[in-house]
Image (cartoon, grey):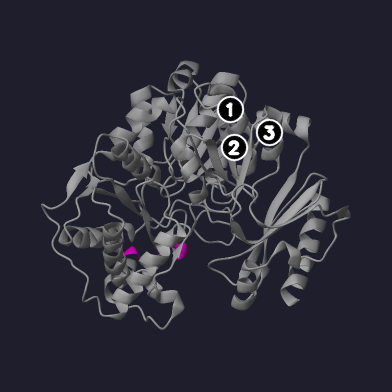
Amino acid sequence: MTNRAGTQALPSDLIDIDALVKAYYDLTPDMSVPEQRVVFGTSGHRGSSLNAAFNEQHILATTQAIVEYRALQGITGPLFIGADTHGLSRPAQETALEVLAANGVRTLKDSRDGFTPTPAVSHAILAYNNGSHADEADGIVVTPSHNPPQDGGFKYNPPHGGPADGSATNWIAARANELIEAGLVDVKRTNPEGLIEEYDFLEHYVADLENVIDMKAIAESGVRIGADPLGGASVAYWAAIKDRYNLNLTVVNPEVDPAWSFMTLDWDEKIRMDPSSPNAMASLISKRNDFDVLTGNDADADRHGIVTPDAGLMNPNHFLAVAIEYLFANRPGWRQDARIGKTLVSSSMINFVADGMGRVLWEVPVGFKWFVPGLVDGSVGFGGEESAGASFLRKDGTVWTTDKDGIILALLAAEIIAVTGKTPSVLYKELTVRFGDPAYARVDAAADREAKARLGKLSGDDITATELAGDPIIAKLSHAPGNGEAIGGVKVETEFAWFAARPSGTEDVYKIYAESFKGPEHLKLVQAEAKKIVDAALKA
């Protein structure tokens, strides 16, 4: 049977949006089933209403828990709420507004009644908290990010504007489950009409872009930009950016369809709005010769994909490395000691770039939340993840967003072309001439729940191997070198290669990230030996 990855979705691939929304209201979660409880991952609670994992009870309870959490924390300012284009996002936002209104929380929703990217919510929170207000704002973003159309998502951003940390999300999830188990008797709800205020997320965000991106250089260069929102929340933003800054920009697909019928299928033949996936971005890649740069965003615009005529879709690690070198050379307003933030499963090319510029590299566990304090105080100029999520400081070295911002990363690609005259992919080739050409990949290995739990608690000392793919092992890490936090797995390094193994939060697998500066064949050897090393440690 032919794999249909990268081909146009067929009617049989599409979900029934009416049935999805009906299930949101009709199905009741069984709290004895772990998959039907409220569980916050790194980006909130996610699930589908069709299997009772994301339903009205979940959102009623989670919103009430957030109300109680913010009261415990002394947060008395407004709460900004935004939602993306997933079919479950608008119903979940409406449910949340009922609870927020009943609890007397001053709540601000989009004045255009449109869709709101995650970075626009982060931007709004930070703008309020940077003013002369005596209280502090926080926010909720209703989004499962790049997940398939049947999923819903609900995440909380505290006053720092970024993703909530584990202490907050664990409390919120536990309280939400208590409320559901008690029959929601302590959940307040009311008709929110007349009780909700409005905020123009788009206007505030778009008008401020010139303070983080050299929009004048982009406009004057005439660089031809094709921007694809992939049916997500950035659709109106790209049109507004084009008009405000007089850019040579085309919104290549302005269509919004909660079934995402226009998408090409991802690697597993599912519809997934992942701008870092060549399969999901296939239709955009086919237009690569029509523009100087093409960009894609996921449903809440916190991720980016960069397509160039000479390379097609860039590997996210490659663009991060280029973006970092460009920014630190072209942002004189940043602190001279501003660090480069990367997750420890991102490419070592970033390490070489940092060394080459004499900048401090700050390597942290997976999760954008680790970059938040440094972005707030300007001590981290750029924070990026291998999964195509990043943000960086304003030109003057102050905070822009503390959540991932796929819009400014896409605009940065255009700025790079405008200022250097070269595409980011050409600049990456120049990096490989200087530092070598690494091969990087992520694969999955089977692991049950017990094995994943053991992996999450492994220490570097549990790794008994002394060599990896023919080279001596020089580091065995279970804590990130940047901040000393547990990585929830292990990372093993040699002079020429490394691998990291972490348990999946949603599937019965563990993820093996690996990279080799000796080429693709050596990478395969690293991957094979990594699985043996990890499996041996799990059995010990």
SS at circle 2: strand
Image point (44%, 51%), residue name: 262
Label 1 packing within 10 angstroms: few (<14), some (14-19), many (20+): many
Q: In this picture, is 247 found above or below 195?
A: above
Q: Amino acid at mark 1?
A: Phe
Structural distance between the alpha carbons of marks 1 and 2: 9 Å
Q: In terms of image quadrants, where is residue 338? A: top right
Residue at figure coordinates x 65%, y 36% from the top left: 311
Q: Residue 207: x percent and y percent?
A: 33, 28
Residue 460 percent across, percent down from the top left: 72, 62
Q: CA distance from mark 1 to mark 3?
A: 10 Å
Q: Earlier in the sequence, mark 1 or mark 2?
A: 1
Label placed on residue 340:
2
The stretch in magenta equals 12-17
Distance in Å between CA atoms under marks 3 and 2: 10 Å
Q: Nearer the viewer, residue 12 or 394?
A: 394
The image quadrant where one finds the C terminus is bottom right
Q: How many marks?
A: 3
Asked if 427 appears above or below 139 in the picture, the reply is: above
Describe residue 399's horizontal placement relative to residue 455 as left or right.
left
Counting from the top left corner in percent of width and height, residue 383 is at 54, 41
Q: Quadrant of residue 398?
A: top left
Q: Which residue is mark 1?
A: 328
Give the camera-side residue of 140 and 220.
140
